[in-house]
């Protein structure tokens, strides 16, 4: 079977998951608790401006020397001081670009999942089998991929896993529903 036989489920899955993403982030409340205001936000912003801190990614406490990281002073700092990451942007996010790139991601993901399904199944395949394979591929793509970053950078991720499960279910449902019948 050709990947071109799956153009409709690929297109609809890419669009549907993108729309679901927009709904999840703009209209549903489940991501709100992931972000909080710093108690001294204005003081921190004033300090960053005063020090002319450049747009970049920062880790604190920071050391670029493994020997320093093993010193008692650094270890004490890691135990007693504030620890985290700070990402400073050079400009505000470009919403049009971000939305376009997100749509492109969902389209590429749907294409890759469709390609995998086209290798696994012929037209007329059992729709439950198509659903199960596409669901697993969707879960790996949308829900499981970022976990190493979560382990290292302690990002809140539970609601993104929930979103990923929804995206995988949407993709699997569309592929199973629109799977080509045998000729």
Image (cartoon, grey):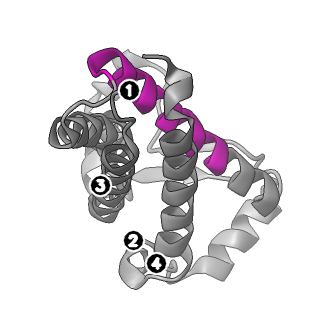
Q: Which residue is drawn at the image coordinates 49% and 36% (left, top)?
A: 109
- Report the Cα–Cα distance between label 2 and label 4: 7 Å
Q: Dot 2 lies on which element?
A: helix
Query: Along the line of sight, which residue is nearer the eye, 88 or 48?
Result: 88
Position above or below: 22 against 2:
below
Q: Which residue is drawn at the image coordinates 26% and 61% (left, top)?
A: 158
Query: Which mark, residue 169?
Result: 3
Which quarter of the rendered picture does the C terminus lie within? top left
Residue at the spot of label 2: 34
Residue at the spot of label 1: 183
- Give coordinates of residue 31: x percent, y percent: 41, 74
Position above or below: 119 against 48:
above
Q: Main secondary structure of the magenta part?
A: helix
Which of label 2 and label 1 is nearer to you? 1
Residue 100, magenta (yes or no): no
Give the quarter of the image for residue 45. Answer: bottom right
- Report the Cα–Cα distance between label 1 and label 4: 56 Å
For label 3, count other residues whose C-alpha is less than 10 Å away and answer few (under 14), some (14-19) or many (20+): many
Query: Which mark, residue 36?
Result: 4
Q: Dot 4 lies on which element?
A: loop
Q: Earlier in the sequence, mark 3 or mark 2?
A: 2
């Amino acid at each position: 079977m050709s990947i071109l036989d799956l153009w409709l489920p690929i297109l609809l899955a890419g669009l549907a998951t993108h729309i679901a993403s927009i709904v999840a982030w703009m209209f549903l409340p489940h991501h709100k608790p992931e972000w909080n205001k710093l108690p001294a936000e204005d003081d921190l912003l004033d300090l960053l401006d005063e020090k002319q801190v450049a747009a970049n990614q920062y880790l604190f406490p920071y050391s670029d020397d493994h020997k320093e990281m093993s010193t008692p002073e650094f270890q004490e700092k890691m135990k007693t001081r504030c620890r985290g990451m700070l990402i400073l942007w050079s400009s505000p996010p470009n919403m049009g670009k971000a939305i376009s790139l997100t749509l492109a991601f969902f389209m590429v993901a749907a294409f890759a999942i469709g390609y995998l399904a086209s290798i696994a199944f012929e037209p007329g395949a059992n729709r439950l089998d198509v659903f199960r394979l596409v669901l697993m591929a969707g879960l790996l793509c949308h829900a499981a991929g970022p976990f190493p970053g979560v382990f290292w950078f302690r990002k809140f991720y539970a609601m993104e896993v929930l979103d990923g499960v929804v995206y995988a279910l949407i993709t699997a449902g569309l592929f199973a529903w629109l799977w080509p019948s045998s000729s």
